[in-house]
């Protein structure tokens, strides 16, 4: 079968999920003919994605979150307004998608939570099965543990999720743990899509804290904390566009430009992991048995949901700020038994192939 992917290019998770699924399909005789990836002027699509996806890549302009002056807080209302003002730019992107679909005639289109995927189906309604993959689709599950309050944020997140999935035939909802499917809602709960390069790692503890931040504004919090903890080795990764490969603040505090091989190497060797609360890297740390502290990006309600869900699933703790003392204090109390989670992850190939072999 021939598959076409549409991938959100913000953060790292959707890209690594796409790489994992592409490999899984290829190993079972299928083909991913092309990948359309959303880009923006604020972020650089990491080189590892072009290297590892091993098929044609079509970058197109896609709606993106707007962040505040300190490069930390996500401005939801402003994001909506700015993206509406640039809608003509996105119409061009939709025409590009239509052209690729016409040329390649895929059997199935899979969307990794990019708004353009849903908008393409809304305006064109192609007679091609449309599947949506992401942890975000679990938020429509009746048993998902939302944080209290945040009614307006919850409404906006549901609207965003709806736009990504207009006319979807099936939602493959990535989850930290097993939950019941809800076929009436087209929701099928599936394991995280971790790549073989993660599953093959041998975890060990070399005594440093590893981390990732979605927005570069959190660097100041980490630097401020480290001034009074200079003996603690801390290595963070970011996708700051203009940054050098390594930004050395102190011999024990280094910021690395996102590099997938290096990132996973550090993940395997760290004693604990601190991150803004995206889904994918939390799963990688859980698979390797690392204690985790999650710091939801300010204004990013979805990440607050992720953090609560991950804590329930035994990942670790969450915090409003990068106070790494909380993580250091938590490490002795972390449960090292991750066998249930590993078994769930290891069942991914069987479950995804059953859902994606469209007849």
Image: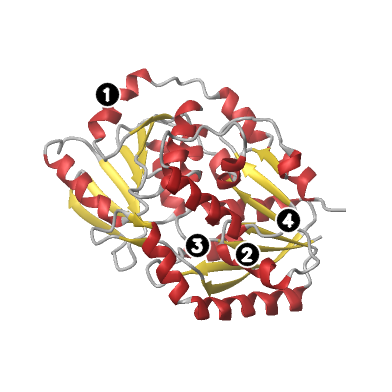
Mark earlier in primary sequence (3, 4):
3
Please say if 113 is above or below 122: above
Q: Residue at x 71, y 35 (%)?
A: 181
Residue labelled with disc 1: 329
Q: Position of residue 171 (x, y in %)?
A: 68, 48
Please tell me whether mark 2 or mark 4 is closer to you in this view.
2
Q: Are marks 2 and 4 in contact (CB under 8 Å)?
A: no
Q: Position of residue 242 (x, y in %)?
A: 30, 68
Name the element at disc 3: loop
Residue labelled with disc 3: 9
Mark earlier in primary sequence (1, 2):
2
Mark earlier in primary sequence (2, 4):
4
Q: Are marks 3 and 4 in contact (CB under 8 Å)?
A: no
Q: Quadrant of residue 308?
A: top left
Q: Position of residue 355 (x, y in %)?
A: 77, 46
Residue labelled with disc 2: 117
Q: Residue at x 33, y 19 (%)?
A: 332
CA separation in Å, label 3 and label 2: 13 Å
């Amino acid at each position: 079968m021939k598959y076409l992917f549409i991938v959100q290019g913000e953060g790292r998770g959707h890209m690594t999920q796409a790489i994992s699924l592409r490999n899984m399909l290829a190993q079972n005789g299928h083909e991913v003919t092309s990948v359309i990836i959303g880009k923006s002027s604020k972020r650089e699509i990491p080189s590892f994605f072009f290297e590892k996806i091993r098929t044609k890549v079509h970058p197109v302009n896609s709606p993106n979150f707007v962040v505040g002056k300190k490069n930390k807080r996500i401005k939801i209302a402003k994001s909506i307004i700015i993206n509406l003002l640039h809608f003509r730019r996105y119409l061009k992107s939709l025409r590009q998608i239509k052209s690729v679909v016409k040329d390649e005639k895929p059997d199935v289109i899979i969307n990794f939570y990019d708004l353009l995927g849903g908008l393409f189906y809304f305006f064109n309604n192609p007679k091609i099965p449309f599947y949506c993959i992401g942890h975000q689709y679990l938020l429509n599950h009746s048993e998902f543990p939302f944080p209290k309050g945040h009614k307006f944020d919850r409404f906006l997140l549901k609207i965003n999720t709806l736009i990504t999935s207009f006319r979807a035939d099936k939602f493959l909802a990535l989850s930290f743990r097993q939950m019941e499917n809800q076929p009436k809602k087209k929701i099928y709960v599936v394991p995280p899509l971790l790549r073989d390069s993660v599953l093959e790692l041998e975890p060990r503890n070399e005594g440093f804290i590893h981390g990732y931040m979605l927005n570069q504004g959190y660097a100041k919090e980490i630097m401020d904390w480290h001034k009074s903890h200079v003996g603690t080795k801390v290595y963070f990764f970011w996708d700051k566009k203009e940054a050098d490969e390594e930004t050395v603040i102190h011999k024990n505090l280094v910021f690395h430009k996102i590099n997938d091989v290096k990132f996973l190497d550090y993940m395997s060797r760290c004693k604990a992991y601190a991150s803004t609360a995206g889904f994918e890297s939390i799963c990688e740390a859980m698979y390797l048995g690392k204690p985790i502290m999650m710091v939801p990006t300010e204004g990013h309600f979805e990440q607050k949901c992720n953090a609560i869900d991950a804590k329930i699933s035994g990942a670790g703790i969450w915090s409003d700020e990068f106070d790494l003392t909380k993580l250091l204090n938590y490490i002795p109390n972390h449960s090292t038994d991750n066998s249930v989670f590993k078994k769930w992850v290891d069942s991914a190939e069987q479950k995804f192939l059953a859902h994606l072999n469209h007849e």
